[in-house]
Image (spheres, grey):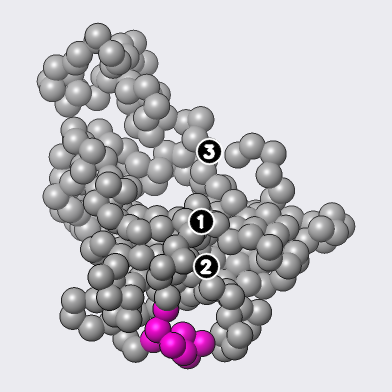
Amino acid sequence: MSSRPFPGRRGVLRGSLAASAALTLPVGLGAAPALALSGRPGAGWGVQTGDVTANSGLVWVRSDRPARMIVETSATESFRNPRRWHGPLLGAGTDFTGTTRLHGLPSGQEIHYRVVLADPQDPRRTGEPVTGSFRTVSQRRRDGVRFVWSGDLAGQGWGINPELGGYRIYDAMAALDPDFFLCSGDNIYADGPIAETVTLPDGRIWRNITTEEKAKVAETLAEFRGNFRYNLLDASTFNGGCSPKLSDLQKRQSPASRTGMTRKAGPGRPLSLATVHRGRVLVPGM
């Protein structure tokens, strides 16, 4: 990722601040709002952080319906005298996802945050807050940097197996308390469906969590989004509890990019659905 300073430790994802002076939070958010009730926005996919520098960071969240994203930060878990950030309105155009950039943060410090989703029509109606923390980059280089890396998530039909604890590797990586996690692609396998079961050579059955979008080759925007959303179903620390994440976007997000394919899709070069299903298509930008 560009030439930004190395990110800090633990937490939530990216962001772009969208000022919203018209929106005000319920009085007393210093004490966390009441738990989400029916009809209130929910953040069941957790939160993630990334692009953490010495004085900034990005926070990501996904709502289950239209909502205003609000982030609060504090030097302590008590959230006494929190700093408030008004984020974007989350809607169908972004699959109800959004990011908020936090800036002006102290360097080399643990930042506690919580994300609250508010009803756009009634800001007093908020969902259950989702909390986390990360450490901003120290300006003292001698402090050193610790990071972990991995890649190729949920490929070749091997998905989230709850019987084995899901993506357990993320718990192991989080235990090392790294400054950041480098995901060296592939983040999704859009042309690799995940079946409910896979029979192993010894006769045992591998059981996947699967979804409508992951049960077939992705062909629509909704299905591509569903491929990314699939990984958020995992209960491990990947879903919010791990370190800020950096993704290597140079790798194609398809296993077919490494199988000697020779044909590219693009303007004026339509491809048949049969070609897509054979996994012989390299889509520019994927």
Q: Are marks 3 and 1 in contact (CB under 8 Å)?
A: no
Judged left or right of residue 225, residue 29 is right
Residue contact at pointers 1 and 2, CB within 8 angstroms: yes
Residue ID at (68%, 65%): 105
SS for dot 2:
strand
The crowd level at tag 1 (other Cα within 10 Å; few <14, some 14-19, many 20+) is some
Work out how far the residue at label 1 is from the one at label 2, CA to CA, in angstroms. Answer: 8 Å
Q: Which residues are magenta?
A: 25-33
Marking on residue 17: 1
Which quadrant would residue 3 be assigned to in this image? Answer: top right
Tag 2: amino acid: Trp
Rendered image quadrant of residue 286: top left
**Which residue shows up at 19% across the image and 54% down it?**
210
> Residue 209 at what x, y percent from top left?
22, 58
Instruction: Specify the amino acid type for callout 1.
Output: Leu
Q: Which residue is mark 3?
A: 248
Comparing labels 3 and 1, the label whose residue is closer to the camera: 1
Q: Secondary structure at mark 3?
A: loop
Mark 3 neighbour class, 10 Å CA radius: few under 14, some 14 to 19, many 20 or more: some
Q: Position of residue 276 (x, y in %)?
A: 20, 23
Q: Which residue is mark 2?
A: 85
Is residue 198 visible in the rendered image? The answer is: yes
Label whose residue precedes the other's in the sequence (3 or 1) = 1
Separation (CA) of disc 3 from disc 2: 28 Å
Name the amino acid type tagged 3: Asp
